[in-house]
Amino acid sequence: MRDIVPSGWRIYTVAATMPVFNRTTWRLRIDGLVERPVTLSYEQLRALPRVEQVSDFHCVTGWSVKNVHWGGVRFRDLLAAARPRTGAAALTLVSAEKPYADSLTLDQAKLADVLLAYEMDGKPLRREHGAPVRLVIPEMYGYKNVKWVERITVTDQPEPGYWEQRGYDTDAWVGRSNGYG
Amino acid sequence: MATDKSYLLRFSRTERAFHWIHASAFFVLLGSGLILYLPRLSELVSRRPLVKAVHIDTAIAWAVALALVVLLGDRAGLRRTVHELDLFDSDDRLWLRRIPRPQGRFNAGQKLNAALTASFAVLFAVSGFFLWLGERDHRFRFASTIVLHDGLMYVSLVLLVGHLYLALIYPATRHALRGMTTGSVRRDWAQRHHAKWVGPDEPMQP
């Protein structure tokens, strides 16, 4: 029954199919303006310091899901191994769902409650929520919370993401952007 | 059929076209809408851009088709039908309080159903239009739009289940389905359920 009753989430996708997660072949690449580009397997990602948080999720279209329980990795722990170079100011999160991508400034990415989440409500992230990892940035609307992240490219400035190219704000602060507030 | 004295024409071709266009569009919109709305269905079907296009194109086709029926169909007849539906007399009010009273071509419950269905259709169309527009222009993005659109789905679903029960299952009323498919209903059935429409002599034609 829990599968049929609406959970409050709506699944927004832009491609014809949802990416399929293969645990053995999946890799997360971190490249761009970094001292040492790294490629992490799912196990290597899970071995990084794990954090949990409960935060609300807001969609720009008007729906919200309260008290989502996330488990994942903080960006400072994720970036530590790759070591951003001087001049690095932003990062682009590339989704396995082509052509979806979005970006954050490094300052935004280092906010205390920004994670790359691999668990949701006590279970591994489900396919429709971006398995195996998605970005969680509760202060910003859902379209910045990129699902199916497979590559993080460090850049000198934010690049307009999928929805920004379609007129949405780059800094998608909840309640203070996209015509709200 | 209508020429047979034991049958009476209850719904004109225009009325039936109006009903079935609305009904078929509703099912396509409900199905595609649920795929867009329920996460597990979204995952199962994927192809959101396609499902979304089906949903929006069906809504447009629905509006165009109904407009064409009004333009090309029996407009005077539709006006009379609307008038019949709008009129709640003392018999209707008593009937709604479960006091048996003779009913016209539409009983009071059918009149209420028609009024609710029409209002929901307008609200669906307006909120759906703003969902579409808000995606393109943030000045038209309101948090309540999606709440209204989803809420309407739930109340419409309740109304639909009741309607289908009476039209397909409940023995006393399901003969009405024949009226909506072929146009005509049995005279004795109409006499029992719509006595004021059949009248003592010949009934009014719709």
Image (cartoon, rainbow, N blue to C red):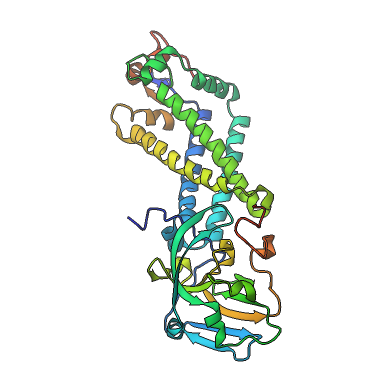
- Residue at the left extreme of this rendering: B171
- Residue at the front extreme of this rendering: A112
Residue B18 visible from this viewpoint: no
Question: In terms of image quadrants, where is residue A100?
Answer: bottom right
Is A22 left or right of B47, judged from the image as shown? Answer: left
Count every numbered label the image shows and give the total.
0
Picture quarter with the N terminus of chain A: bottom left
Residue A178 rendering spot, x and y as whole percentages: 66, 56
Is B54 left or right of B31, judged from the image as shown? Answer: right
Residue A77 rendering spot, x and y as whole percentages: 52, 82
Compared with A143, B113 (above or below) is: above
Residue A98 rendering spot, x and y as whole percentages: 58, 72
Residue B33 visible from this viewpoint: yes
- Residue at the bottom extreme of this rendering: A36
Compared with B52, A45 (above or below) is: below
Compared with B57, B161 (above or below) is: above
- B124 and B82: which is toward the camera: B124
- B74 and A151: which is toward the camera: A151
Residue B5 rendering spot, x and y as whole percentages: 38, 17
Name which residue lies at 55% across and 59% down.
Answer: B50
- B115 and B179: which is toward the camera: B115
Is B50 left or right of A162, judged from the image as shown? Answer: left
Name which residue lies at 45% across and 39% down.
Answer: B156
